[in-house]
Structures are given as C-alpha cells and as structure tokens.
Amino acid sequence: MDIRIARPEDCPAVNDMMGRLIEEIYARESPEVRTALKANFTGEALHELCGDEQSLMFVVEVEGRVVAFLFGWLFHYVFTIYWIYCEREFRAKGIVKDLLAQAEREVVARCGYKVEMYAYAEHNRFLDFCGRLGFRKGVLIEKSMFGFPIQNIYKWVGDPDKADLERKIRIVGEAGQGVKLLSYTLASILAQLGHEVSLNLQYDAAVRSGSIHADLIYSETKIENPIIDEADVLIKFTRKREWFPAKALIIDESFCESENLSCTIQSRKGTSYGFENVAVSMFGSKIYINMIALGRILRYIGINILILNIADILPKRSLEKNLEAVKYGFNFRDAV
C-alpha cells in the first residue's frame, strides 16, 4: 500500500470515487442536492480545485489501483478536510486512519497546527471513529444551504500556543461598492462557524464619494487588538494606489489598466480577478461586486459555502441574484 500526494493522472480515479462518495453519504437527500454537490466537486471542478496551490489531495494506491483519497484546503496553517473516501472492499483495513495520519504529518511539515472537517451531524459512526483518533467536536451548524445539520470536528496537530491563531482581512473600496454589506456578511458567516470576530469600519468624511476600509479579524481565541498592521488577505476595489502590507492580494483586474498601477505592488503575492467586469457581464449591475468578492474570499480562506445557510444572512432584496453571485465567486457550478 502506497499513500502519497495525488498526481494529475490520479484525477479520473478520484473523480469516479467522488461521485460514489456523494451518492453514498447523501443518499437520503434529494437528487438536486447530490447533483449540485457533483457539479462542485467532480469533472472540471475537481481539476480546478486540484490545480489550486492551497489544495492538498492524498491517494492510497494498492497494486497500481487508487482505492482511497483525501482532499482538503490549507489556509493560515489550518487544514480543512473536505472529503475522505475508501472503496468498499478496502474498508476496515485501517486505510482511512492511515490517510488521516499522513495528512497530519504533511500539515505539520508545512508548519500547520490544526486539522478540521465538517461532517453530516447524524453520521455518528464516522464521528465516533474520528473521536477515537483524537478529534473533538466544535460548532454545530444547525442548518446548511441544503437544510441538514453539519458538525465541525477538529484536532490539534501542533502547539496552538505557538501559533498565530488570528486571520486578518482588509477590504478597501469606495462608497457605493457594498463594502459594508460584504464585511458584515463575511463577519456573520465566520461567527456562525464559531470564530471570535472583530470588524472595524473606517469612512472618509465624504460619505457619498469617499473611501471605506473594513478591517476584519477572526480567531479561535479572544482578539486582543482589533487593528490590522499586516493583512493575510487584502481585497481592493479602488483605483487609489494606497500601500498596505498584505501576504496575499485580490484585486479587480479592471483597475490594472494603467502602467503606473501594479496589481501586485501591495503584496508579496498578487491575484487578479475581475469583480466589476463579471458583475456587469453576468449579473447586469456593478452592485453585485461585493457578493462575487464574498464567494471568492470564502474559497480563498477555505470555507465551503455548501455547509452554510447563506440565504439567512443575505439581504432579502434580490436574494436569488445575490446567492448566484456568491456561488459564482466561489466557482459554484449549477447542474447543466
């Protein structure tokens, strides 16, 4: 038996197992739920996810055949496991236990300190199994996007006392771009997931045309200082060339037309994404910039929108379009 990080040629086998996993785990749910899940995690969607540098996928190979896999997302030294699956004939042989152990070793090697996952709350057999491996129960999400409860479980694999438990997000924009709604919605989602959250909004004197900054910090412990000196993620919706230190930058590509404005100048690592262009071309108005950005942020920080009931958080006006914009930003794929 060989447990290793997945290679591109493993994707077809994992894709087939992913389909069977969804059919098995969500057998009691509606066909629409299973179809939506497959649209997000099979086929081209799986290839896109595996191509992201934050994703980690491990496979188990037995005599040349891939018989199990584990897929997850690493952000800020926390590894969130999305899926684990083992073919039926290879179960009860310790494969899933070995997969989890390998994932933990890799997370530790990358200076991570925590492994977590979200499981079907009624899947008691799996939760008990994880409990025997050292996982603890965290927050219970009573209602997800599809209407069933989700249980968070987690395990410390490093020393949390030596880790930076705070994640810091700064959002920079202008009046009328929905920065306030975006930041409040993101803060509500993070609080729903059991985090301590601090949100600090700063406005220019010119309310209608001035700039607005949102500093959002979320943590697993009490937040002592609400001020951000360096952001883990900077989201920029403005043409103003304001320097702010950040580890990663997400910026609207429509702001990068001038040679004097570099998309990556504020960050050691920059990402360009056309929020405004997509909002107009896909949804007919710039007002959906913030919801597209919300989906993109959730994907980047490793929060699967399928475990959340975002509809209860979003404003009721234009709810369906706002939901679609969030899904689009996250690369949500409706069935076709």
Image (tube, rainbow, N blue to C red):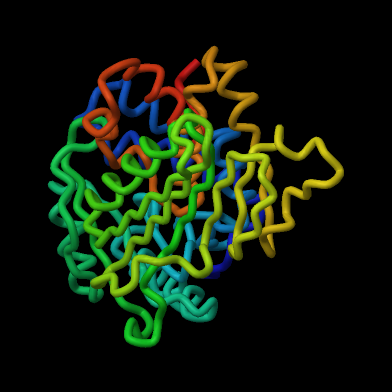
Describe residue 255's horizontal placement relative to residue 329 as left or right: right
Residue 301 locus on image (x, y percent): 46, 54
Front residue (pair 132, 119): 119
Q: Is residue 163 above or below residue 94?
A: below
User: Which residue sits furthest right?
Assistant: 259
Describe residue 22's horizontal placement relative to residue 239 as left or right: left
Residue 95 locus on image (x, y percent): 38, 66
Q: Quadrant of residue 236?
A: top right
Q: Is residue 31 above or below residue 91?
A: above
Task: Report the residue at 41% width, 50% height from top.
Answer: 202
Front residue (pair 273, 23): 273
Q: Quadrant of residue 178?
A: top left
Task: Report the residue at 17% width, 37% height from top.
Answer: 143
Describe residue 295's horizontal placement relative to residue 154 as left or right: right
Q: Is residue 15 above or below residue 219?
A: above
Task: Report the residue at 46% width, 73% height from top.
Answer: 102
- Residue 41 can be seen, yes or no: no
Task: Report the residue at 29% width, 29% height from top.
Answer: 314
